[in-house]
Every structure is written in C-alpha cells, then in structure tokens.
Amino acid sequence: MYMSPVDLSSYKSLFIKTAKEFIVNLRRNLSFLSQNTNNKEVIYEIFRSVHSIKGQCLMMGFPKTAELCKTVEDAFHTINDEKQAFSADMMAIFSDSVNSIEQSLLSIEKNNREIDLDEENTKLQNYLKSRNFAFSLVELVIVVGIVAILLAITLILLQSPK
C-alpha cells in the first residue's frame, strides 16, 4: 500500500496555538518551581508540557526544536524520578531553553521554518553533564521507538478514508 505524503500545513495553526499554551504552562510552572523546588506535581507538569511540544514538533517536521525539547524533557524526567534534585540555580538555564523554544515557534509561525537551536541544545547538554545528569541510552532508544510508532500510527490514521 502506497501512502502519499501528508500535507500538514492545515494543522499549523492548531500546532502553534497548542504549543503557545504549553509555553505559558512551562513558564508558570517554572515560576512555581522556583518557589518550591520539591513540588513533584509541578515537575511532572513541566515534563508533560515540554514532552507535548516535542511530539508536536516531530509530527510537524521541526526536529531542531524537538531536539531541544527532548533535552529539557530528559532533564525533568531525571528530576521527576529523583535521580537528580532541582535547584534554584537551574532556573536560568531552563528559562533560557524555554525562551529559545518559543523563539523557534514564533519563527515557525511567521516564516514556516524553525531556528537553529544546536548551540542552545549543546549549552543545555553541557550544563546538565556538569551537574551529573545521566541519561540512559536504553531510555533514549525506548522513547525514540515509541515516538516512531506513534508517528506511524498517526500517519496511517491521517491516510485512512474518512
């Protein structure tokens, strides 16, 4: 069965709208987290929001933005699993990451292309390594596999007759 490419442009406004809502949630929850660095609900909400943006970016074909989201997501997964504690001094680097993600989303909205976030992603990865954040290769492979399966299912559903 041949599947023709899916035109995702009709989904762009919904993608941008929901991504902006997740950015608002990220900012609000980072602010809450600065007041109580042990709040598990807030930590999970940050993880969930950035995970959602990552998935949307992958579906819409914006891998650089998704990659930065993945790094933030991995960090909050590690914090949520209590393998690493969140500290107030981490706030600036995560706020910078959210700002970079938002700037890329604005570029997508206006120019239909993301900005290059390699430098920001490398900066965050280096910071996390200096803080001894450890990401398991097995965890990464599992997540990439799940995302690939979800993408395939979504594409099949989009191609099925209505």
Image (cartoon, rainbow, N blue to C red):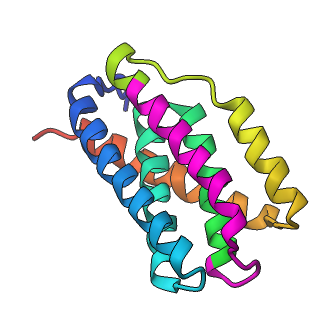
Q: Residue at x 78, y 49 (%)?
A: 125
**Majority secondary structure of the magenta segment?**
helix
Q: Is residue 103 magenta?
A: yes
Q: Position of residue 126 (x, y in %)?
A: 84, 48
Q: Vertical placement of 63 versus 46: above or below?
A: above
Magenta segment, which residues? 80-106
Whether residue 4 sits left or right of residue 58 in the image: it is left
Say which quadrant the C terminus sits in.
top left
Quadrant hosting residue 29: bottom left
Q: Residue furthest left?
A: 162
Res 7 seen here: yes
Q: Is residue 52 left or right of residue 77?
A: left
List x then y, in percent, for residue 144.
Answer: 62, 53
Q: Quadrant of residue 100?
A: top right
Image height check: is 3 above or below 31?
above
Residue found 55% across the figure and 41% down from its top? 66
Q: Is residue 77 left or right of residue 28?
A: right
Please name whichever residue, 112 or 137, is drawn nearer the observer in this view of the structure: 112
At x 81% / y 66%, what residue is drawn? Answer: 133
Say whether residue 144 is visible: no
